[in-house]
Each structure stands twice: as C-alpha cells, then as structure tokens.
Image (cartoon, rainbow, N blue to C red):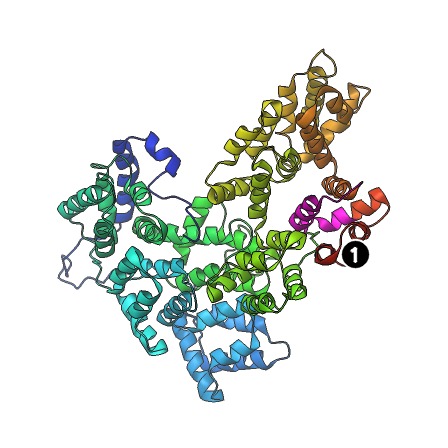
C-alpha cells in the first residue's frame, strides 16, 4: 500500500491495544456508542401527513461542505474578471483564486460557458497556459464537475506504466452508486474507453475483482439494517478467514462490496461473536497488498467516512515532503460534500487543525487556495484568509528548483543513463539542483514511465563514491539514516561512530521516522539490531536515545539544570567509581538548551568542565557517545564541522563520512556547518574537498556545498 496505516478509528482504539480488551467491552463501550451517535439522527417516520392533515415539510438536509454558492453571482462579470486576470502582466492569481473559490461548482460551470461563448477559447486552456505547478492543479480541478474530476483522477492513476492503486481505491470505495455511474459515463465520453476495461488492463487478482464489483454501482444503499443477514455475514467472514488456514478472499470481496455502510457497521459489531480479534484486524491479518488496502478502506469508510479522508490528508503531510496531489484531490472533491466534517475529524484525531498543517506544509497561492476551500476559519482568533507564517530561516544549501518537472527530469536522467559512457554531468546537475521532495517525485515518474526503479538504473550505470552520493540523494532523509544505521550494524563488527552520530543529532520525530522506515525496509526493529551488536552502558545509552522521548523544550529550567549539574558531579568526580546510569538518564532525556545550561553550571561544583569529567569518568564507546551529546548540545554545526575535518585529516579520506554528512545536512544546516568549518580551521570546507577528493565525487560534493 502506498501510505501504510494510521489506525484508527472513531469506534476502535489503536491496534496495539485491541488484544488487551475483551470482546464484549469492545462491542458495548465502543461500537454501540458509535452506532447510537450515528443513527440517532435518522428519522424513521413513514407518515406523509402530520396530525392536522397538513403535508409535512421535508426535513432540510444539513450541508457539510465549505464552499457555498455566491449570493450575488453574475457569470458574465466573473468571466470578464477571469479574462482580465489571465491577460494581466504576470497573471492576477489572487483574482483567479477569489472568483473560483467563492463560487459553487455549478456556478463555475456557468462561468466556463460564458467565457467560451465570449472568447471562443475554453477557460481551462486559458488558465492552463497562464498558471503552473500545484496551484494550477487545484484550479483545473475546481473547473471540472465532480464526475469529470473523478474520471480524470482515475484515468491518470492508470496512465502509463504502473498504476496508482490508492487513488482507484479511494474514489471507488467512497462514492455512491449514482456518482460511480456518472463517473463511468463521463470516462467513456472523455477517453472513449470503459472504466472497467481500463481497470482490467491495469490491475489483477483480488484487487481487480473488488474494483470491478464496486464499478457495478449496485451496492445496497438502504439505511435499514438486517440483523439476521449481518449475523450470517459476520459468521461467513470468520469462517472464510480467521477460522481456517488460508483465506477465501472472494467471500470478503462479495460482502464488503455489496452491503450498505450501515449494514457493514453491524457486521463489524457482530464479528466479535465469532472472532478473537476485530474484523479490521482480521482483514489486516488475512490479506496483503492492494486488496488489504481496498478492504480496509471499505472498513474505514463504513465506520466514519470523514475520518477516513482526515487520515489520508494527515498522511499526505506526514514525514518529509508533502503529497500535494492527495491534498488537492480530497480538498477539491469534498469541498461541497463533507469537508466541514473532515475538518472536525482532523482536529479530533490529531489535536490540530488541517488549516494549521496546510500553513506549515505548503506555500504561495497553493497554500492560499487550499485554505480558502477549507473555509474562513483558519486558526482560532484569526480571520484573514491569508494568514502569514513567520518565515523560518533556512540554512540548507540545496533548494527546490523553481521550474521543476518530474516527468522532464525522469526523461533527462533516462537519456543520460543510456548515453554512451553515461552522461554523469547531467545526472549530477539534476540531483544537486533539486530538493529531496522533488527527487522523490522524479523517482516515481521514472518508475511509472520505465517500470524500473531509478535507484537500480543508476546503480548499474554509476560507480564508486559518486554512485554512493547519488543513491543517498535519492533516498528520503529517514531512508538514508536507516540505511546508514543498517550498514553500521551489518556483518562482523559494528561502526559505533555512525550509530552515535545519527542518534545524538536527530530530533524525536526524525528518530521515530527512522525506526518506522528501518522496520519497513529490513523487517527488523532498530532496537533489536542494536541489542545484537552492542552491549553494556553504550547499549543502554543508544536504546535510551531510540525511545525518542528526549525533551525538545527550548526554554531552560535553571533550577533543574543546577540540580542535574550537582547530580553529575556527585555521580562521577566526587566519588570513587562512576554511577553511569545517572549520566545516561540526564544526557539522554534533557533538551539541547538544557544540557547547554548544565554544562555551564557544572563549574559551580568542579574545577574541571563537564566535558573533561566525562572523559575522566567514562571510557570507550560510552565516553564517545557522551562527548558527542555534549558537542551537539553546545554547537551542532561545529560538531559536524569537526567530523568533516577529521574525515579528511591525516592519511586517506573517509569518503563515507563526507558523503553521509554533506548529503544528510544539505537541506538542514550545511550553510552553518560551512561557516563553522571556516571559523574552526581557517579554511573553507570546499578547499579541503578540492585537496582531498577528485572526479565526479569532488564535483558533486562541491555542488552540494553551494556557492559559498
């Protein structure tokens, strides 16, 4: 699956707690409360007349969209305003956004018709030639009808080599029968192909069967629940999976794709009568790959559709890089359906607003149009749609390319690889002049186009240290760190210095992401690998850092720092022998600024500095680990500058260390490291790279160091 799991749910606690609960408590405390909440609003009144014989008014269906029709709508004026905005110098994107976000989809269709009538040019073509990047994608999505947009997304998910199964699943599991019929009709009109035939050509196995079943658009949509059918289905699912060796996936597909969402909820509730785990767990355990993702999506949609979309939005912004396509697709397609509910679920599930995460993860007009579609309430106490974030200083040397195209870059790399002798200059330029997020998109585009991972293609084309740098640049930061840790633990002997460097210098969030990626890549827990390769106080220290619960508070507690300084003195220098556990506890739990304060206060109790005390009281890898924690707390860029200097000092050059630090810090603080290097050693890092390396390896390191 594309994104992994972020379970769950309104009615179920996190997976790791499932087995600790009894089946009955799960049903009564969680499932039943969910059903009471969901169904208390359903009116089971079949009478057409009230007691006075008057015709009863149909209840007003609540509207949960964030975009509403403009009350003073004038399609002629809007079409003229859009034309003026497009034709203005540099394009008036603010007007485009204001007009399109403040109009309903129906009103946008009228504007399109008027625009084409007056200019003879489709509005989409005019806007496509005027805009670019993610903002263009949102605007183009807003100009389509819901059916057109879904058909477009489905087609693009199946276009070229490879298929984005996640999009197929998301759309087909969450749309009504009527919506799916409309999508199929438009798909046929737009692409002269049947949606089902495209799915058959691009998917296979159980996933294809499930998607084709959903494409029939004959799923029950009755709100009434059949208890006996639900009981029979629950038993059938248990017997098709958990109760036997092997799984009859066809039973799961048949029930999940034919029953209504309320009926599925009842089945999930009754499954506990038969299974030892919940139905969600049973699905996850009995299936793998895309069919697992499809069935789990059906589970999630039945339980709580807004929560399903909230989770997908959260995952699109989680970790390094943002999946702008998912953000755009969900926010545009749900803006006149249930985006208000999704916003509410997002806040409930993650403790922060979707708008706040959009502000942190996006920028420019793309950010503004997404916020506009989310409604006017951006943050508590703020009502301006264009809330400006404080600009965080950037100390990386690598920045995103302003005119980036993943498809164009992938084609250029393919051409460079196939060139006689391999065009390494082109590969170098395309790697160094793109951000990590852009490289990930190029990787995806390359595999989509060629059916081959870009890493494999480059691995067979390049060699030596240059290859190591390029492959490092193609990994996400967490993947690169996990790879470096695995290599350090691989085979006989352990490279303790690499373990220390990564674990002492990464944030809690980064360490959690590394652990997750390590597990996914190597099917092993990082902690278990460390236990197998290290021991003693050093092992205890590394495992404490792996917990990723070190304080990251920027404010310093002076009294606590004084208490810690005294405790360290008494645990080491003051007595015979050393209570290493106290050193480990303080050094691995306090924030960088707090450790900095402890270092300065230690002199109250000792004539030596804390760094000298660590060297005197500890030894071996444990001493090295604590010294690096001290250096990182005191001055992180200087810490990395020293490591780079040592990598080139003396006879021979440690190219692995050079590569690891320059690649991993190129979008973090390499500018600061360069400055500290010059201050500490009186010469630039670039000068030493020129003296100690050569060829394409030298060139790519210098390019990563930037212009300074």
Q: What is the magenta segment's predominant secondary structure?
A: helix
Q: Nearer the viewer, residue 285 or 671?
A: 285
Q: Nearer the viewer, residue 420 or 355?
A: 420
Q: Quadrant of residue 106?
A: bottom left
Q: Residue at x 24, y 53 (%)?
A: 253
Tell me if residue 222 can be seen.
yes
Q: Nearer the viewer, residue 49 or 455?
A: 455
Q: Residue at x 60, y 43 (%)?
A: 484
Q: In screen coordinates, is 491 left or right of 37?
A: right
Position of residue 621 relative to residue 674, above or below, is: above
668 is within the stretch colored magenta: yes
Q: Residue 347 location, x and y as percent?
A: 45, 47
191 is within the stretch colored magenta: no
Q: Quadrant of residue 46?
A: bottom left
Q: Residue 671 location, x and y as percent?
A: 74, 51
Which residue extends farthest top?
A: 576
Residue indicated by mark 1: 708
Q: Residue 303 location, x and y as percent?
A: 31, 48
* Rendered-image quadrant of the C terminus: bottom right
Q: Residue 299 location, x and y as percent?
A: 30, 49
Position of residue 320 relative to residue 616, above or below, is: below
Asked which secondary structure carries label 1, the reply is loop
Dot 1: few (<14), some (14–19), or many (≥20) neighbours within 10 Å?
A: few
Which residue extends farthest front?
A: 421
Residue stretch in magenta: 651-674
Tell me if residue 42 can be seen.
no
Which residue extends farthest right?
A: 682
Q: In screen coordinates, is 51 left or right of 644?
A: left
Position of residue 644 relative to residue 453, above or below, is: above
């Amino acid at each position: 699956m594309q994104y992994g799991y972020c379970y769950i749910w309104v009615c179920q606690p996190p997976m790791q707690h499932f087995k600790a609960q009894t089946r009955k408590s799960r049903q009564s405390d969680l499932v039943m409360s969910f059903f009471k909440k969901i169904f208390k609003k359903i009116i089971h009144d079949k009478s057409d007349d009230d007691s006075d014989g008057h015709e009863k008014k149909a209840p007003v269906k609540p509207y949960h969209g964030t975009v509403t029709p403009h009350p003073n709508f004038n399609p002629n004026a809007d079409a003229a305003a859009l034309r003026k905005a497009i034709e203005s110098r540099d394009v008036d994107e603010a007007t485009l956004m204001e007009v399109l976000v403040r109009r309903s989809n129906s009103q946008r269709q009228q504007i399109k018709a008027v625009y084409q009538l007056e200019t003879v040019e489709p509005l989409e073509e005019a806007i496509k030639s005027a805009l670019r990047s993610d903002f263009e994608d949102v605007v183009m999505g807003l100009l389509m009808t819901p059916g057109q947009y879904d058909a477009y997304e489905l087609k693009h998910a199946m276009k070229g080599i490879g298929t984005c199964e996640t999009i197929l699943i998301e759309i087909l599991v969450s749309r009504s029968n009527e919506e799916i019929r409309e999508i199929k009709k438009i798909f046929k009109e737009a692409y002269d192909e049947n949606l089902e035939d495209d799915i058959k050509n691009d998917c296979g196995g159980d996933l294809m069967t499930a998607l084709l079943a959903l494409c029939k658009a004959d799923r029950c949509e009755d709100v009434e629940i059949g208890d006996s059918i639900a009981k029979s289905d629950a038993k059938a699912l248990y017997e098709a999976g958990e109760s036997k060796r092997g799984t009859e996936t066809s039973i799961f597909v048949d029930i999940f794709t034919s029953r209504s969402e309320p009926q599925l909820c009842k089945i999930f509730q009754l499954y506990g009568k038969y299974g030892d785990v919940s139905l969600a767990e049973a699905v996850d355990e009995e299936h793998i790959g895309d069919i697992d993702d499809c069935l789990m999506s059906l589970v999630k949609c039945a339980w709580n559709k807004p929560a399903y979309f909230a989770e997908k939005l959260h995952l699109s912004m989680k970790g390094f890089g943002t999946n702008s396509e998912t953000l755009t697709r969900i926010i545009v397609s749900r803006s006149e359906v249930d985006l208000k509910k999704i916003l509410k679920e997002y806040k409930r599930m993650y403790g922060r607003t979707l708008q706040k995460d959009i502000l942190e993860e996006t920028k420019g007009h793309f950010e503004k149009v997404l916020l506009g579609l989310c409604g006017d309430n951006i943050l508590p106490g703020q009502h301006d749609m264009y809330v400006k974030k404080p600009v965080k200083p950037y100390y990386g040397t690598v920045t995103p390319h302003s005119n980036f195209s993943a498809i164009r870059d992938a084609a250029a790399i393919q051409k460079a690889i196939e060139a006689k002798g391999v065009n390494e200059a082109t590969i170098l330029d395309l790697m160094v002049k793109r951000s990590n997020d852009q490289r990930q998109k190029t990787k995806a585009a390359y595999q989509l186009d060629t059916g081959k991972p870009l890493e494999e293609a480059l691995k067979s084309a390049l060699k030596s240290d240059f290859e190591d740098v390029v492959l490092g640049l193609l990994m996400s930061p967490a993947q690169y760190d996990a790879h470096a840790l695995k290599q350090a633990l691989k085979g006989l002997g352990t490279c303790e210095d690499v373990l220390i460097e990564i674990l002492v210098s990464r944030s809690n969030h980064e360490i959690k992401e590394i652990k997750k990626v390590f597990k996914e890549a190597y099917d092993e827990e990082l902690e278990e690998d460390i236990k197998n390769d290290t021991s003693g106080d050093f092992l205890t220290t590394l495992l404490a850092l792996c917990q990723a619960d070190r304080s990251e508070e920027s404010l310093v507690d002076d009294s606590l720092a004084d208490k810690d300084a005294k405790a360290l003195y008494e645990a080491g220098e003051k007595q015979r022998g050393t209570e290493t556990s106290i050193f480990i506890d303080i050094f691995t739990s306090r924030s960088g600024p707090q450790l900095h304060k402890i270092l300065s206060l230690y002199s109250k109790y000792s004539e030596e500095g804390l760094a000298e005390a660590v060297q005197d009281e500890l030894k071996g890898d444990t001493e090295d680990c604590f010294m690096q924690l001290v250096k990182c707390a005191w001055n992180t860029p200087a810490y990395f500058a020293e490591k780079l200097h040592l990598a080139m000092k003396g006879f021979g050059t440690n190219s692995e260390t050079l590569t690891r630090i320059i690649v991993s810090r190129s979008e973090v603080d390499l500018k600061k490291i360069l400055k500290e290097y010059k201050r500490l050693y009186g010469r630039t890092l670039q000068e030493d790279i020129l003296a100690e390396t050569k060829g394409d390896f030298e060139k790519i390191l210098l390019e990563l160091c930037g212009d300074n």
